[in-house]
Image (cartoon, rainbow, N blue to C red):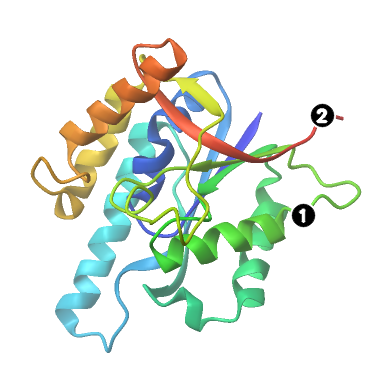
Amino acid sequence: MKVLAVAAHPDDEVLGAGATLARHAREGHSVEIVICAQGLLSRERTADEVTQLLKLKDDAREAARRLGARPPTFLDFPDNAMDSVPLLDVVKRIEAAIAESRPEIVYTHHPGDLNVDHQVTARAVLTACRPLPGAGVRAIHAWETLSSTEWAPPSLTAPFLPNHFVDVESTLGSKLGALACYAGELRPFPHPRSPEAVRHLAGLRGATAGFAAAEAFVTLRSTWR
């Protein structure tokens, strides 16, 4: 099986589906990652900021290695400004990645997230994966991103109501190990983007589905040929 995760920023792929991707890899599936935006605020780059961006890409490569995935593909769209890019440009880049990797399952952001880059990424993925004749993608699952999904007011966006749960008791450690690669993006507990919060959420989602630990998703599309 071939799996593709499309994330807006470095660390989103781990926060949202790290343990699930690790389980895919452990079961012998091919796992690829696309990261759409640069991960630092878009502005004129100083030498120090360029160094930070390069380090963030190295962190993403190491995180992918710890999950058992291939090195990520970086699209380098502007951070927190993907809504300033024509959606068609984002769609075309994601279509190219899909044409190259030919995934059967795609993971990405929930369309109702607070973060605008997450929203654009989710919309672009759905467009790139539209079910045309001969399309190989048979399932699209949207993850929750701590410090974004739960902060979106349900009165303004579609709430995250998971209907697909993956038992990740055996790979939660791999997720936390990959998350440690992004030390600069983490915050002390009780911030949601902390290792403790990640553990707590896995426990809650697991208990919801009868597992010790789980990652939860909203299935945006599923087909069976």
Circle number at residue 112:
none
Q: Residue furthest right?
A: 133
Which residue appears at 33% of the width and 51% of the height?
60
How far across and how far down the image is residue 113, in percent? 43, 56
**In the depicted view, which residue is nearer to us: 128 or 219?**
219
Which residue appears at 24% of the width and 76% of the height?
50
Vertical arrangement, residue 210 with respect to residue 197, above or below:
above
Which residue appears at 38% of the width and 59% of the height?
9
- Is residue 5 shown to the viewer in this render? no
Vertical arrangement, residue 45 with respect to residue 179, above or below:
below
Report the side of 152 relative to 25 (left or right): left
Report the side of 178 relative to 82 (left or right): left
- Of mark 2 and mark 1, the one earlier in the sequence is 1
Q: Which residue is mark 1?
A: 130
* Mark 1: few/some/many CA within 10 Å (<14, 14-19, 20+): few
How far across and how far down the image is residue 76, in percent? 44, 71
Instruction: Please identify the quarter of the rendering in which residue 78 is found.
Output: bottom left
Report the side of 133 relative to 178 (left or right): right
Residues at marks 2 and 1, CA–CA distance in whole angstroms: 15 Å
Residue type beneath disc 1? Arg
Q: Element at badge 2?
A: loop
Vertical arrangement, residue 73 with respect to residue 89, above or below:
above
How far across and how far down the image is residue 142, in percent? 54, 43
Residue type beneath disc 2? Trp
* Mark 2: few/some/many CA within 10 Å (<14, 14-19, 20+): few
- Is residue 195 shown to the viewer in this render? yes
How far across and how far down the image is residue 82, in percent? 47, 74
Tally of marks: 2
Q: Which residue is mark 2?
A: 224
